[in-house]
Image: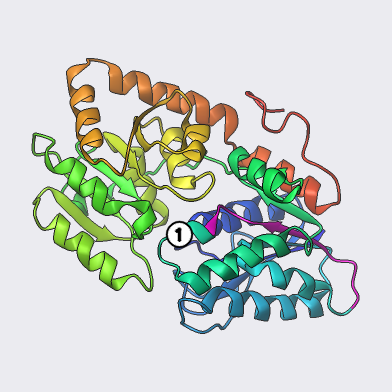
Amino acid sequence: MKVAILGTRGVPAAYGGFETLAEELSARLASRGHAVTVYAREGRVRERVPAWRGVEVVTVPTVAHKYLETVVHGALSGFHAAARAYDAVLVCNGANALACRLPRLLGSGTRVLLNVDGLERNRRKWNALGRLVYSASERLSCVLPDVVVTDARAIQRYYAERYGKESAFVAYGSDLPRPGDLSALAALGVAPGGYVLYVSRFEPENNPDAVVRGYRDVPGSRPLVLLGTAPYAGAFIQGVRAEAARDPRVLLPGALYGEAYRALLANAAAYVHATEVGGTHPALIEAMGFGRPVLVNDTPENREAAGEAALYWDAAVPATLTRLFGRLDAEPGLAERLGEAARRRAASLYRWDAVTDAYEALLAGGRPPACYDRPGGC
């Protein structure tokens, strides 16, 4: 097939879950013989390249504006895709629902999938207009694409119950290659197994500030490494930095990707997950895939991902995180048992080859294999 992926910031991945999906899925589809194009945003990838991991990369401009960047880039990419007459297009982000019509603007029979992600309108960064736009996009998501894709069962149930819309469930993979270069740890002055890691965009509903407050009363000298940044969130990030300045153990290296990211993830003593909005979060299941004990903010989507292989806390009450670290220190072998349970769960449920099987079937007009999301897979 001739396939395109649009609506993300593009590849090489340098932001969040959709970018991880675009990179890992596109590379695997290309390795199976499909001609794959990923649309990238000017200035929003690690480097501007014409191709990446066997995939064509088309860089399209946008406007650097909190409320317009995604939709403008989605629209421009959609118009470009119309001239290409792809067999199938995967559009990412429910905000791009209107762009779903564009790839077949010139009368082609392009099949369009839309991955809506989580309930974006619930993010605290949006004002009333932003929430209204995302609410409208939810409704449009139910009628404009050929297939709606949801990455968590909780989001799938939401669309079914609120809109009566059936969607195809496809999550993410967790099986990243183990890192061979640990220089990122040395650069931060941390040792394997000697630090706690948090990874997410620094936005209010991802609660990096709550993680810092919860860690403040954890005894010992072990560093807390917070990986992340975010555009259009300067005031909030400044607040996180102010919180972090009260604890010299907190390290803020910004956002890291590729080998550096995998090195930090694979060697953390524990991984703290604090999101409250969204579906399945790649960083969480990737930490599980590396066998890290995970301490997870208790939401339905996060429980769906981590199941019984995690300890749960409440980001609204940072002291609950403090108590979990006390429990890890007090119960010999608990961290190892949790890490092994997380590794087994990730290997059973979150595999990139199975994700690719599911998307390949959907892009071709079929459905994911019946065994796609069963423990052990196909």
Q: Which range of residues does the magenta coloring cover?
A: 107-120
How far across and down, in percent of the image, does residue 257 sit?
40, 57
Check disc 1 and report the residue beneath it: 123
- How many numbered marks appear? 1
Please tell me whether residue 338 belongs to the stretch shown in magenta: no
Quarter of the image with the N terminus is bottom right
- Residue at x 13%, y 36% (from the top left corner): 218
Specify the quadrant of the image occupied by residue 97.
Answer: bottom right
Specify the quadrant of the image occupied by residue 15.
Answer: bottom left
Badge 1 density bin: few <14, some 14–19, many ≥20, Cα 10 Å: some
Q: Is residue 349 visible?
A: yes
**Most foreground residue, 72 or 137:** 137
Q: Is residue 200 visible?
A: no
Quarter of the image with the C terminus is top right
Which color mode does the image show? rainbow
Secondary structure beneath label 1 = loop
Compared to residue 310, the image places residue 163 above or below, namely below
- Residue at x 63%, y 24% (from the top left corner): 375
How far across and down, in percent of the image, does residue 365 sit?
86, 51
Specify the quadrant of the image occupied by residue 244.
Answer: bottom left
Q: Does residue 150 appear left or right of residue 347 in this picture?
A: right
Compared to residue 161, the image places residue 6 above or below, namely below
**Most foreground residue, 21 or 240:** 240
How far across and down, in percent of the image, does residue 321 sit?
25, 36
Mark 1: amino acid: Arg
- Residue at x 49%, y 46% (from the top left corner): 282
